[in-house]
């Protein structure tokens, strides 16, 4: 691992020690930071973020509320080690890069179910409204030994909103903002004897902005709107002590317009629904059986008569057993994933394929005195690409009540998408999965007033699938055919901290410095910055909650050859919350306050070097009135 990165770990120790001295005098009067949040994504069982050896971030409901009127990609962009690119305004296609890895190299779960597109391999984050989300857990680093294929960059798990209550509680909000944006939502949580249940509906509508910046064709100079109607429902029944049955449902239906010389639009429908049976078999043994379906359907009208339809369905069965030992928890899980894809181009069927995967996982998480350990091993049997074995080893040592060091190794792989395998005149059915090996280490410091973490990582990806190969018998797009031809090396360091300055003020920030490069060319990967980060200052006093944030990224390139540069940028945003009474709250947010003209993606290429960039929003505001009976 790079010596400069190791030196960075050492250099953090005196810096934080100095900060501790600065704030220790008034530490007893500070508002305390959460020291021991519980997450389930790092190990597939509840573990503390303090002792977890993996690099984990938990996004709470309070943080989500401050982003009212914004999108899920806007929220994810503020998290450590995450970058976002979008093809225009609200509702347009977005890509998420975790620690410099590709957008297809992350597993995304909603209430434990995969919802990514099996055809593209990516997830339509732009179509998942923040209003439905209660909590997000982000695991950075390879996790195929826990979750199977595609977890080269990490795992993002989204939990929909639900509240435990002994009575009936209603909540809702209405909002309005720039670009003729209007939103509304309403929901409830209730209980009847041993049955806990609830539901929520959400609506979003905006006229938006033109998807392209200064387009050359007059028809593309219009505003490209976006609308979304979504909902969730749940029911949890404790039919005996230690025995629970849970039902979950989520659906999001969005339509957005885009620019391409005609009046174009696309629709995206995402669903996740399932049932979970959890049984406490003995004092130490818990069984969890889950059945669910994640589905994405999309339709695109591009031009006068060009129509595309995609329907991907992922049926998932999991049977997990957790056995508590005196020094930790042993986990065994069986995962069944059935992927079905049906696509049409101009009403002509283009793909009708199925593949199945059986995964067997064995894991252990333990803590003994100052030592923490996490082990995982998994074997996947797939009907399309064969068998793969992955593993992970993590170790943590608590130096003192404040200081901890961790080290972790993990292997992972990504399966080729159905488009890369089978799309007519493009796919190659003999493509191999991508494989990776990652090592990382972290130094952590934590008190009631200061939290800081420095993580170094090095990820090597082999058999990278690149759409840059020569024409083959199955692919006629010379220079753009998918091929296993690349190796990628990603080295980086992420620093993050949260400091309570006094009872009212809190400062939070993160910075990632990375080098995601293609081994053969030494070029940066597409749309990946070498430096990016965020700084947030929050003031809370009485009924007021006021915050400001700066989000910045260095230059990127839009193409693999690094010919088309995307300039660096820095955005200033602000949020305001005022509690009118115990149930009513006024929230406001202003984005891009300095009206920065910046670009996250472009349509420029070697074939059209003067093509327009994708547009981004200028200064915009959003105000909402929120009601909650809690």
Image: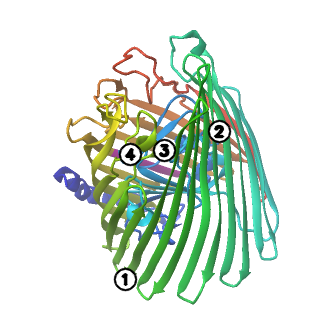
Which sits earlier in the primary sequence, circle 2 or circle 4? 2
Whichever of callouts 4 and 3 sits on the residue coming sooner in the sequence is: 3
Q: Can you say whether 398 is above or below 283 in the image?
A: above
- Residue holding disc 1: 368
Of tags 4 and 1, which is closer to the observer?
A: 4
* Label 1 vs 2, first from the N-terminus: 2
Task: Determine the image quadrant of residue 83.
Answer: top left
Distance from disc 2 to disc 3, alpha carbons, whole Å, reads 23 Å
Question: How far apart, in angstroms, are the residues tagged by discs 4 and 1?
Answer: 48 Å
- Side (left or right) of 281 relative to 422: right
Q: Quadrant of residue 310?
A: top right
Q: Is residue 569 left or right of residue 244?
A: left
In this rendering, which labeled residue sits more in front, label 3 or label 1?
3
> Is tag 2's residue or tag 3's residue first in the polypeptide sequence?
2
Which numbered dot is residue 594? none
Name the quadrant of the C terminus: bottom right
- The image shows residue 451, relative to residue 287, as above or below, that is above
Residue drawn at x 51%, y 79% is 321
**What's drawn in magenta, residue-wise?**
504-512
Q: Is residue 331 visible?
A: yes
Q: Secondary structure at mark 1?
A: strand
**Which residue has dot 3 on it?**
122
Residue 429 shows which numbered tag?
4
Label pair 4/1, CB-CB below 8 angstroms: no
Main secondary-structure element of the magenta-colored stretch: strand
Q: Report the front residue among 275 and 327.
A: 275
Q: What residue did someone put label 2 on? A: 69
Give the quarter of the figure containing the N terminus. Answer: bottom left
């Amino acid at each position: 691992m790079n010596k400069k990165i190791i030196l960075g770990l050492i250099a953090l120790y005196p810096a934080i020690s100095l900060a501790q001295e600065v704030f220790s005098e008034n530490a007893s009067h500070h508002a305390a930071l959460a020291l021991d949040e519980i997450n389930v994504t790092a190990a597939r069982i509840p573990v503390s973020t303090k002792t977890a050896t993996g690099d984990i971030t938990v996004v709470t409901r309070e943080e989500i509320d401050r982003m009212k009127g914004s999108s899920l990609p806007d929220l994810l962009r503020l998290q450590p080690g995450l970058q976002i690119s979008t093809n225009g305004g609200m509702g347009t296609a977005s890509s998420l890069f975790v620690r410099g890895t590709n957008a297809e190299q992350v597993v995304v779960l909603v209430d434990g179910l995969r919802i990514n597109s099996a055809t593209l391999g990516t997830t339509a984050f732009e179509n998942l409204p923040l209003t439905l989300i209660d909590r997000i857990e982000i695991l950075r680093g390879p996790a195929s030994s826990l979750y199977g294929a595609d977890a080269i960059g990490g795992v993002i798990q989204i939990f929909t909103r639900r509240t435990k209550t002994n009575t009936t509680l209603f909540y809702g909000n209405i909002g309005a903002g720039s670009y003729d944006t209007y939103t509304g939502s309403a929901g409830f949580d209730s209980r009847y004897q041993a049955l806990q249940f609830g539901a929520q509906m959400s609506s979003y509508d905006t006229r938006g902005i033109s998807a392209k910046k200064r387009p050359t064709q007059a028809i593309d100079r219009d505003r490209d709107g976006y609308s979304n109607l979504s909902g969730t429902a749940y029911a949890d029944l404790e039919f005996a002590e230690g025995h629970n049955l849970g039902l979950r449902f989520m659906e999001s239906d969005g339509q957005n317009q885009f620019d391409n010389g005609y009046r174009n639009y696309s629709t995206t429908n995402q669903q996740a629904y399932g049932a979970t049976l959890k049984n406490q078999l003995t004092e130490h043994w818990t069984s969890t059986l889950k059945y669910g379906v994640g589905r994405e359907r999309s339709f695109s009208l591009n031009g006068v008569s060009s129509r595309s339809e995609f329907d991907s369905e992922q049926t998932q069965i999991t049977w997990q057993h957790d056995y508590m030992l005196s020094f930790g928890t042993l986990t065994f899980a069986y995962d069944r994933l059935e992927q079905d894809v049906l696509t049409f181009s101009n009403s002509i069927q283009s793909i009708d394929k199925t593949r199945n995967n059986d995964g067997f996982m064995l894991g252990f998480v333990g803590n003994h005195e100052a030592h923490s350990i996490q082990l995982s091993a998994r074997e996947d049997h797939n009907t399309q690409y064969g068998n793969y074995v992955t593993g992970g080893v993590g170790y943590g040592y608590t130096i003192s009540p404040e200081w901890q060091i961790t080290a972790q190794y993990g292997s992972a792989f990504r399966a080729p998408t159905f488009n890369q395998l089978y799309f007519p005149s493009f796919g190659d059915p003999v493509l191999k999965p991508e494989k990776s090996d990652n090592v990382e280490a972290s130094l952590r410091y934590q008190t009631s007033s200061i939290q800081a973490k420095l993580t170094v990582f090095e990820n090597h990806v082999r058999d990278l699938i690149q759409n840059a190969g020569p024409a083959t018998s199955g692919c006629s797009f010379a220079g753009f055919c998918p091929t296993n031809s690349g190796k990628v090396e990603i080295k980086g360091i992420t620093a993050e901290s949260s400091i309570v300055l006094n009872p009212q003020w809190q400062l939070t920030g993160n910075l990632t410095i990375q080098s995601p490069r293609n081994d053969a060319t030494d070029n940066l990967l597409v749309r990946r910055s070498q430096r990016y980060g965020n700084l947030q200052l929050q003031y809370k006093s009485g009924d007021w909650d006021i915050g400001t944030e700066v989000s910045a990224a260095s230059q990127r390139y839009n193409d693999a050859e690094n010919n088309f540069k995307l300039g660096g940028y820095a955005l200033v945003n602000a949020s305001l919350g005022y509690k009118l009474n115990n149930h009513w709250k006024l929230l406001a947010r202003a984005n891009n306050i300095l009206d920065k003209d910046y670009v996250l993606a472009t349509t420029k290429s070697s074939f059209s070097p003067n093509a327009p960039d994708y547009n981004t929003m200028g200064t915009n505001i959003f105000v909402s009135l929120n009601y909650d009976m809690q």
